[in-house]
Image (cartoon, grey):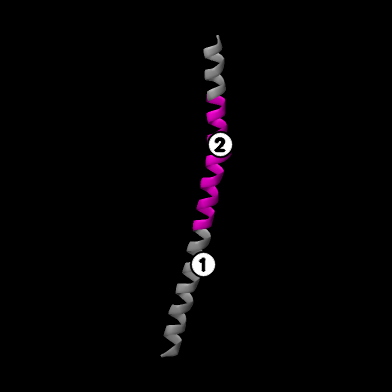
C-alpha cells in the first residue's frame, strides 16, 4: 500500500515539475528568442536600407 501511495505521489510531483516549471521556462526562452530574432531582423533591415540610400 505504501509503495502505491509513493508511486502516485511521485507521478503527481513529476507532472507538477513538467507542467509547472519546465514548460513555462521553455515558453519563456522561446519568447526571448523570438524577440531577439525580431530585433536582429530590424537591425539588419535598417542597415540594408541605409546602405541602399547612401549610394
Of pointers 1 and 2, the one earlier in the residue sequence: 2
Q: Position of residue 43 (x, y in %)?
A: 48, 73
Residue 33 in the image, given as x and y percentages of width and height: 49, 57
Q: Residue furthest bottom?
A: 55
Q: Is residue 19 above or below residue 26?
A: above
Residue 39 is tagged as: 1
Q: Main secondary structure of the magenta part?
A: helix
Give 53 or 7, whichever is nearer the viewer: 7
- 1 lies above or below 25: above
Counting labels gives 2
Q: Position of residue 45 (x, y in %)?
A: 46, 74
The CA distance from mark 1 to mark 2 is 30 Å
Residue 15, picture quadrant? top right
Residue found farthest to the top? 1
Dot 2: element = helix
> Is 5 included in the stretch rendered in magenta?
no
Quadrant of image for the C terminus: bottom left
Q: Residue at x 44, y 89 (%)?
A: 54
Residue 26 lies within the magenta run: yes
Q: Write down the region rendered in magenta.
A: 11-33
47 on left or right of 15: left
Mark linked to residue 6: none
Question: Which residue carries the number 2 mark?
Answer: 19
Residue at x 55%, y 19% (from the top left corner): 8
- The residue at 45%/87% (across/down) is 53
Count neighbours of disc 2 (C-alpha within 10 A) and say few if under 14, some if 14 to 19, many if 20 or more. Answer: few
Amino acid at each position: 500500500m505504501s509503495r502505491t501511495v509513493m508511486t502516485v505521489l511521485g507521478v503527481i510531483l513529476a507532472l507538477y515539475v513538467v507542467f509547472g516549471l519546465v514548460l513555462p521556462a521553455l515558453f519563456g526562452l522561446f519568447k526571448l528568442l523570438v524577440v531577439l530574432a525580431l530585433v536582429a531582423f530590424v537591425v539588419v533591415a535598417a542597415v540594408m536600407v541605409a546602405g541602399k540610400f547612401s549610394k
